[in-house]
Image (cartoon, rainbow, N blue to C red):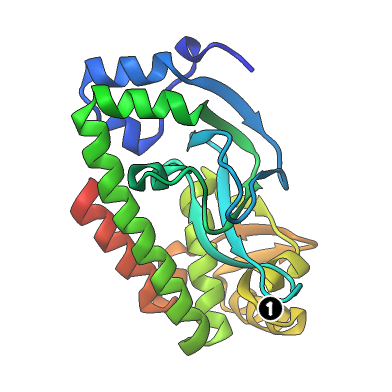
Amino acid sequence: MSAIDVRPVVNTLIQRLPPAERKALLARCQTVDLTFGTILCEAHGPLRHVHFPLTAFLSLVASVDERPPIEMGMIGSEGALGATMLLGVTSMPLRCIVQGAGQSLRLTPSALRKALDESPMLRRTLNRYLYVLMVQLSRTAACLHFHEIGQRLARWLLMTHDRAHGDHFHLTHQFLSEMLGVRRSGVTTAASVMQANGLIEYSRGDIHILDRQGLEAVSCECYRGVNEEYSRLLR
């Protein structure tokens, strides 16, 4: 953990705030290092900390009947974990796991409540982000039901690429199959097709995005739909 005043702020929601409101919020935050696989909150459990990710990114996952978890949403430097506090709720409906290691700005729920009282723009921004998160969750639910594995994998890789701050990241077939809610063999087949078409390079869990535009072309409309809503409301 290190002092926030020596770290660049790259969280888009915080960047939108007027300078005085941004400074007041940052004074309540700590910069922390998040490690892959850390559980930040359980579904319906208490939210101990609010996070504004910087270089880290998070997965919102659901589990039903002791089955493997499936990813419903993703949060990176464009968003925040804990926006549900605007509804007076200090919990999340989904488990949150660190999917990409990195840094995050962290504060307590009580500190966020005080910041919301002091910053009209923060309240307005988080209200809009909460709507975008609802769009993402609803799109994911429809995507899981209607779209083919290849389209879903392309969407998931694009979402990860947006938040990974680089063209390389590490994801095993097993992890991908759990996040997409499909068999490992299905992920292997879809990833092989993408590699054969020059969209990605994939070896032993190491993924290198080679053709971003190509991935966007084969992805389903769900990826574009969420991004368009985010751009309309928050950019």
Where is residue 79? Give x, y as percent.
Answer: 40, 44
Residue nearest the viewer, comparing 136 with 209: 136
On the image, numbered disc 1 is attached to which residue? 187
Toward the right, the furthest residue is 204
Q: Is residue 80 left or right of residue 131?
A: right
Q: Is residue 153 left or right of residue 84?
A: right
- Say what amino acid the circle numbered 1 marks: Val
Residue nearest the viewer, comparing 192 with 181: 181
Considering the image in quadrants, where does the N terminus appear?
top right
Which image quadrant is residue 180 in?
Answer: bottom right
- Asked if residue 78 can be seen in this view, the reply is no
Q: Is residue 179 above or below residue 117?
A: below
Q: Is residue 216 above or below residue 81?
A: below
Where is residue 129? Give x, y as percent.
Answer: 31, 49
Q: Residue at x 61, y 35 (%)?
A: 102
- Asked if residue 82 can be seen in this view, the reply is yes
Residue nearest the viewer, comparing 1 with 118: 118
Which image quadrant is residue 13 in?
Answer: top left
Q: Residue at x 48, y 50 (%)?
A: 75
Q: Residues within 10 Å of mark 1 (few under 14, many from 20)?
A: many
Where is residue 196? Give x, y as percent.
Answer: 63, 79
Q: Is residue 84 above or below residue 94?
A: above
Q: Residue at x 33, y 68 (%)?
A: 224
Q: Residue at x 45, y 10 (%)?
A: 5
Where is residue 55? Give x, y as percent.
Answer: 53, 36
